[in-house]
Every structure is written in structure tokens, then in C-alpha cells.
Amino acid sequence: MALQSTELTPNTGSEIFVDKSVLLSGALAGELRALLVQRGVIIARGLNLTDDEQRALARSLGDLRLGTVKKEGDEGLMKVTFDAKINPEYAQFFFGSQLWHMDGTYEEVPPFATLLTPRVLSETGGQTEFVSNYAAYEDLPDDEKALLDTLTVVHTMQAALFPGKRDCSPEEFAMWCAYPNREHPLVWQHKSGRKSLVLSTSGSHIVGMHPLDSHDLLQRLMRHATQEKYLYRHTWQMGDLLIWDNTGTMHRVTPFPEESGRQLHRFTLNGEEVVRGVV
Ligand SMILES: [Fe+2]
């Protein structure tokens, strides 16, 4: 079955045009996964998926992350919101989502993909932005790629969060530091053969490199990877579905008023491969 789609920017993001019943049948799962890895982000308008439909679609695409089930019917569901009454665990780290990041860089096998649908939108801001860590790598000169292919980065919670909350308390900073660190190669050679930068604000420093050089290199790569030419900015409409490949993109949310009550429903797919360096 041919999946109808159009590219939204040169490097990142495709819109698909699909009947809801066909989408939920699972018949397009193989094509959707291929398009996701190729384009980083897939969106569809006007689907108005329920939680059960969104979960079923997630399950057709991979291994659903179950998380903590708080009440029946919520299996795998995370409510993305500032509102601590709705999601206290998430709300305390939500400010970090305004910085460019990959999810789960603290895990040996970072999540593969995430599906989002809106439930409450903000009248201003609250767009979700994505850049392609594949395209950012592929555009680098060969000699730089050869150097980056050899490097390893330490990812930490304090690196991920401090830039978003410089006025944090010492206790809060200590709490972030208590999370385990994780090392990943700077360049991921995926099973598909395609390579991407494992770039995220969580990247604290490069193993064995002088701190100044390490800082400058990570900052320069971040500026390179977040150029407009790698960006897809999603302006939400009710009814949307958005899926992103977390292994080959970074994302962030643009600022929006907390009192807007903005809320998205999210289901995440577990990763399928460790971050393997270039061999
Ligand atoms: Fe995130």
C-alpha cells in the first residue's frame, strides 16, 4: 500500500495523508517506520486520535514503553504539561524541554520514537521544533567527520538542565548530579548504516579532551545542527498526530504561558539498538 506524503522542509519532516482506519489497521507500519527514519518527523492533520487509538498505532510501530500505570486505561500514556497536579514528575523537569535535546540519553538504549497528540493548546508559543542530527552529520566535511567518529561524550542531567535554570538551588543542582551519567559515541552508526550526531544539551563533555576544547566543539556542533536548514517547526492544531525518530533528531518546545494549560498526550517506543560508534 503506498503511503501518500509530502516533504515539509528539505531535511526534516513529512506530512502524511492517510485515512484513520487504514492508519490504525497497521497495514502501513513498515512504510511509516521507513519514512520516520528517513525524515525524522511525520505529521498528520485532522486525525483526532483517542488515547486508545494513539496507543494502538504506537504498538503497531514498535515496542510501547509502559512506564508507571497510574490508573486503568493510562497504560503507556504520558501527559506532557507544566501542570504539577496532572503530572508532578514531568512538571519539575519541563523547563528543560525548551533546550535542544534527545530523550533518554541517560539510557544505554535511547527511545526509538515518540507519538504526540494535542489535548489543550496555547494561543501563543508552544510550537515543537525538530532538527535532523542525520543531515547535520552528513553535511560536515570528511576530515571533521573522521575526527568526530572517534569521540565519546558524557551525558549528564546537570548539563541538560542547568542552562535552563541557572538560578536553581544548590539542593536542586545536587539532585540532578545524583542521576547516573552515560557515555555515548558522538557519532551513531545505526543498524541501517546511516550515521547521526548524538548531540543534545545533556552532552556535558568529550572524554579525554581539554574542557575548553570540548566545550567549544560541542557548542559549535550545536550551532551547526540547529541551523534553519535542518529545522522543522510544528505549529499545533487540534487533531494533529506527530511522530518523531528520537534516535536521529533533537527537539525542543518554544516558550508558552504556563497558565495556557497546554497539554499533549504522548506514547513512547522503546529503543531497538544501542548507540554504536563508527566501526
Ligand atoms: Fe523531550
Image: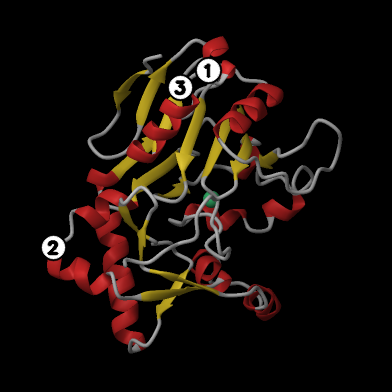
Residue 142 image point, x, y percent: 14, 64
Q: What amino acid does circle 3 point to?
A: Ala
Examine the image and state in which quarter residue 32 appears: top left
Few, some or many C-alpha atoms within 10 Å of disc 2 (few <14, some 14-19, many ≥20)? few
Circle 2 sits in a helix, a strand or a loop, which is it?
Answer: loop
Look at the numbered disc 1 and give the secondary structure of its residue: helix
Calculate the distance from the C-alpha at mark 1 to the C-alpha at mark 3: 10 Å
**Which quadrant of the view contains residue 55?**
top right
- The answer to whether residue 231 is visible is yes
The answer to whether mark 1 and mark 3 are in CB contact below 8 A is: yes
Residue named by callout 2: 141
Comparing 242 with 108, the one in front is 108
Residue at image mark 3: 44
Separation (CA) of disc 2 from disc 1: 40 Å
Q: Who comes first in sequence, dot 2 or dot 1? A: 1
Name above or below for residue 167 compared with residue 211.
above
Q: Which of the 4 image quarters holds residue 122?
A: top right
Residue at image position (71%, 38%) is 77
Residue occupying image coordinates x 59% and y 29%: 60
Could you tell me which secondary element the residue under label 3 belongs to?
A: strand
* Quadrant the N terminus occupies: top left
Q: Position of residue 15 (x, y in %)?
A: 37, 24
